[in-house]
Image (cartoon, rainbow, N blue to C red):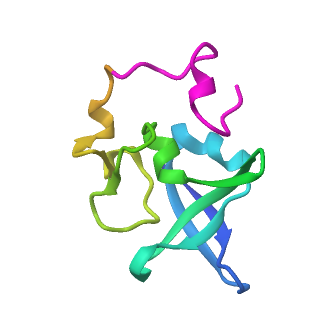
Amino acid sequence: MATILQIKKPRSLETIDIIVDDQDKWVSRWKWSAWRGKRNLGYYAVRSIRAGRKTKQIHLHSLIAGSLPGEKVEHLDGNSLNCKRMNLLVDGVCVLDLKDRKPITKLNYNNYLGLFL
């Protein structure tokens, strides 16, 4: 099954529906914004966090995929608003196949900016 999150388009009253898996509905506790991607290919769900004097954007699809800094996350169907795990690829590997990756725990969560357990 899937959960639908609604976010507002920038400078508009329109909303955009983002599709996530039921197991990932924990991301709804944060406020997400719509961000127009590079070359205007579509909208992405992002949230901004402040680290000292700098502001960093976290993409919803990267957070769900658990990608490390520098890893590229792609959408299989080309729809940037479909953030279901079976639709995400991290450096060419399906997110469902990343079971051997070390899970995020209280011991290593400091490596992930903006993640608080």
Q: Is residue 17 magenta?
A: no
Is residue 113 shown above or below 39?
above
On the image, the x and y values in percent for residue 103 come to 47, 20
Q: Is residue 41 visible?
A: no
Q: In front here: 115 or 21? A: 115
Judge left or right: residue 40 versus residue 8. left
Please count the marks in the image: 0
The residue sitting at 66% across, 68% down in the picture is 7
- Magenta residues span 101-117
The residue sitting at 69% across, 56% down in the picture is 48
The residue sitting at 42% across, 50% down in the picture is 84
The quarter of the picture where residue 51 lies is top right
**Which residue of the protein is positioned furthest toward the top in this rendering?**
107
Judge left or right: residue 16 versus residue 14. left
Check the picture and name the quadrant holding the C terminus. Answer: top right
On the image, the x and y values in percent for residue 10 come to 67, 79
**Which residue of the protein is positioned furthest toward the bottom in this rendering?**
12
On the image, the x and y values in percent for residue 80 come to 42, 66
Is residue 107 shown above or below 55?
above
Q: Is residue 25 visible?
A: yes
Q: Which SS type dominates the magenta stretch?
A: loop
The residue sitting at 54% across, 52% down in the picture is 60
The quarter of the picture where residue 57 lies is bottom right
On the image, the x and y values in percent for residue 35 come to 57, 71
